[in-house]
Image (tube, rainbow, N blue to C red):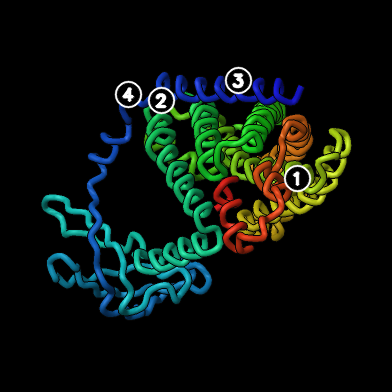
C-alpha cells in the first residue's frame, strides 16, 4: 500500500511539473509595454557624492512638513567630476549629509536649465557586505545542503525576475503567472534543497495542495469583500506606468507567492518529523505516526501563525500609526480596504498553513511505512564475528567498505 501511495505521489509531482513547464511556455512574455514609457521619461540617473549640505532659511515655515527644512546641496558627479548645486526639501531634517553616495536624477530640456535632485541613496557597499554575511552563515551552518538551498534561492529569483515580472508586464494574467511560477519554484527548489526522496515528494504534494487552497480562498474573499487593489499605491503607480494591469490580479498573485514562502517551510518540516519518528521506531503504525507528527505540527502552526501576523503588522506599522490618529471607529478602520487587504492576506495564508500540516502529515506517514531506514548500517551490526587473526580496526574497515558505509 505504501509503495502504491509513493507511486501515486510521484505521478502527481510529474503532472505538477508538466503543468508548470507547459504554463511557462504558454505564458512566456511576448514583449513588455514598459520600454516605451521608459523612453518618454526624460530623466537619467547618474552616480554622485554629496559634497556639502547647507540649510536655506525659509520665511514661511507653514509650507513645510514638521521637522523638514530646505537645503542647498552641492554634489560631485562621479563619471565626469562635474560639481552641481541645487536645492531640495529635506523632509526629516537629517536625511542629507556630506559624503553620502547618491543617485542624482538629471532632467535636460532644450532652452531650460538642467534640473537635478537626489533620486535615491547608493547602497551597493552595505548590501554587498550583508549578502556576504548571509551566504557565509548559510554555508557554514547548512554546508552542502545550505549550498543547495542557495542555488534554490537563486533559481526562485531567476523565475520571478526572468519570467513572472516580464509575463505580467506583457499582459498575461497575474494569477495564472503566479500559480505557474510558484509551482515551478516549488518543485525545483524543494528537490534541489532536500534531495530526491519520498519525504521530499510528500512535502511537494502537500505544498501544492495547500497552495491551491490558499489561492482559492484568496480569490473567494477578495471577491466577496469587494477588494479592488486600488488601496496599494505601488500597484496604482505600476498600472499608471504600464497601463492595463489588473490590480486585483496583482493582489492575488502577491498572496500566492507570499504563501509559498511559508508553506514549503512547514510542509518540509512536517515530512521530516514523520520520517524521523519512523526511523526512531520502525514499529510505529500509521495512526501513531500521524498523531505524533500532528502534535509537533500544532506547535509549528501556533508559532508560524503568530509570525505571519507580526510580519504583516510590521510591514503595515506606518499605516497603523496613521489610522490610530484618526477619528474613525475601529470597525471602520479594520474594514477599510487598506487594512482589510492585510487582514485577508494574513488569514488566508494562515488557513493555507493550517491545511498544509495534516495534508503533508498523512501523505508522509503513508509513504514512510515503506521505508527501511539505514539497511546497510543494520546489516553492519548483524555482521559475522571478527576472526581472531584480523585486527579489530581492519575488520571494521572491511565491513564498512562491504556495506557502503565509508
Mark 4 or 1: in front is: 1
Q: Secondary structure at mark 4?
A: loop
Cα–Cα gap, marks 4 and 2: 9 Å
Mark 4 or 2: in front is: 4
Cα–Cα gap, marks 3 and 4: 32 Å
Q: Does residue 240 appear to the left or right of 16 in the view shown? A: left
Residue 48 lies, in percent from the top left, at 24, 68
Residue 91 lies, in percent from the top left, at 45, 68
Q: Secondary structure at mark 3?
A: helix
Sooner in the amino-acid sequence: mark 3 or mark 1:
3
Residue that numbered label 3 is attached to? 11
Q: Does residue 142 appear to the left or right of 3 in the view shown? A: left
Q: Secondary structure at mark 1?
A: helix
Sooner in the amino-acid sequence: mark 2 or mark 1:
2
Q: Residue at x 49, y 60 (%)?
A: 139
- The reply to whether discs 4 and 2 touch (Cβ–Cβ < 8 Å) is no
Residue 177 lies, in percent from the top left, at 48, 28
Residue 154 visible at all: yes
Sooner in the amino-acid sequence: mark 3 or mark 2:
3
User: Which circle marks residue 98 in the picture?
Assistant: none
Q: Does residue 391 appear to the left or right of 65 in the view shown? A: right
User: Which circle marks residue 279 in the picture?
Assistant: 1
Residue that numbered label 4 is attached to? 30
Sooner in the amino-acid sequence: mark 3 or mark 4:
3
Residue 207 visible at all: no
Relative height, residue 47 to residue 352 (above, below): below
Sooner in the amino-acid sequence: mark 4 or mark 1:
4
Amino acid at each position: 500500500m505504501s509503495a502504491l501511495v509513493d507511486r501515486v505521489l510521484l505521478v502527481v509531482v510529474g503532472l505538477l511539473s508538466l503543468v508548470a513547464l507547459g504554463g511557462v511556455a504558454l505564458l512566456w512574455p511576448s514583449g513588455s509595454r514598459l520600454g516605451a514609457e521608459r523612453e518618454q521619461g526624460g530623466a537619467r540617473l547618474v552616480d554622485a557624492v554629496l559634497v556639502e549640505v547647507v540649510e536655506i532659511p525659509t520665511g514661511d515655515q507653514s509650507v513645510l512638513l514638521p521637522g523638514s527644512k530646505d537645503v542647498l546641496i552641492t554634489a560631485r558627479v562621479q563619471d565626469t567630476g562635474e560639481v552641481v548645486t541645487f536645492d531640495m526639501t529635506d523632509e526629516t531634517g537629517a536625511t542629507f549629509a556630506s559624503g553620502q553616495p547618491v543617485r542624482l536624477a538629471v532632467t535636460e530640456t532644450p532652452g531650460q536649465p538642467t534640473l537635478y535632485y537626489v533620486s535615491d541613496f547608493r547602497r551597493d557597499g552595505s548590501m554587498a557586505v550583508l549578502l556576504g554575511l548571509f551566504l557565509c552563515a548559510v554555508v557554514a551552518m547548512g554546508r552542502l545542503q545550505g549550498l543547495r538551498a542557495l542555488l534554490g534561492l537563486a533559481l526562485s529569483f531567476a523565475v520571478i525576475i526572468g519570467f513572472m515580472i516580464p509575463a505580467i508586464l506583457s499582459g498575461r494574467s497575474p494569477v495564472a503567472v503566479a500559480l505557474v511560477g510558484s509551482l515551478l519554484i516549488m518543485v525545483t527548489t524543494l528537490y534541489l534543497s532536500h534531495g530526491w526522496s519520498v519525504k521530499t515528494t510528500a512535502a511537494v504534494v502537500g505544498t501544492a495542495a495547500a497552495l491551491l487552497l490558499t489561492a482559492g480562498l484568496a480569490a473567494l474573499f477578495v471577491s466577496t469583500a469587494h477588494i479592488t487593489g486600488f488601496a496599494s499605491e505601488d500597484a496604482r503607480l505600476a498600472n499608471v506606468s504600464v497601463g492595463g494591469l489588473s490590480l486585483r490580479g496583482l493582489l492575488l498573485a502577491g498572496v500566492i507567492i507570499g504563501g509559498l514562502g511559508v508553506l514549503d517551510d512547514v510542509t518540509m518540516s512536517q515530512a521530516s518529523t514523520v520520517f524521523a519518528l519512523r526511523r526512531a521506531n520502525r514499529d510505529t503504525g500509521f495512526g501513531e505516526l500521524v498523531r505524533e507528527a500532528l502534535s509537533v505540527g500544532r506547535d509549528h502552526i501556533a508559532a508560524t501563525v503568530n509570525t505571519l501576523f507580526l510580519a504583516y503588522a510590521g510591514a503595515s506599522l506606518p499605516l497603523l500609526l496613521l489610522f490610530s490618529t484618526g477619528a474613525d471607529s475601529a470597525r471602520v478602520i479594520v474594514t477599510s480596504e487598506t487594512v482589510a487587504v492585510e487582514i485577508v492576506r494574513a488569514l488566508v495564508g494562515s488557513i493555507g498553513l493550517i491545511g498544509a500540516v495534516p495534508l503533508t502529515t498523512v501523505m508522509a506517514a503513508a509513504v514512510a511505512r515503506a521505508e527501511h531506514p539505514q539497511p546497510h548500517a543494520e546489516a553492519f551490526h548483524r555482521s559475522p564475528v571478527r576472526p581472531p587473526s584480523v585486527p579489530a580496526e581492519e575488520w571494521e574497515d572491511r565491513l564498512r567498505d562491504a556495506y557502503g558505509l565509508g
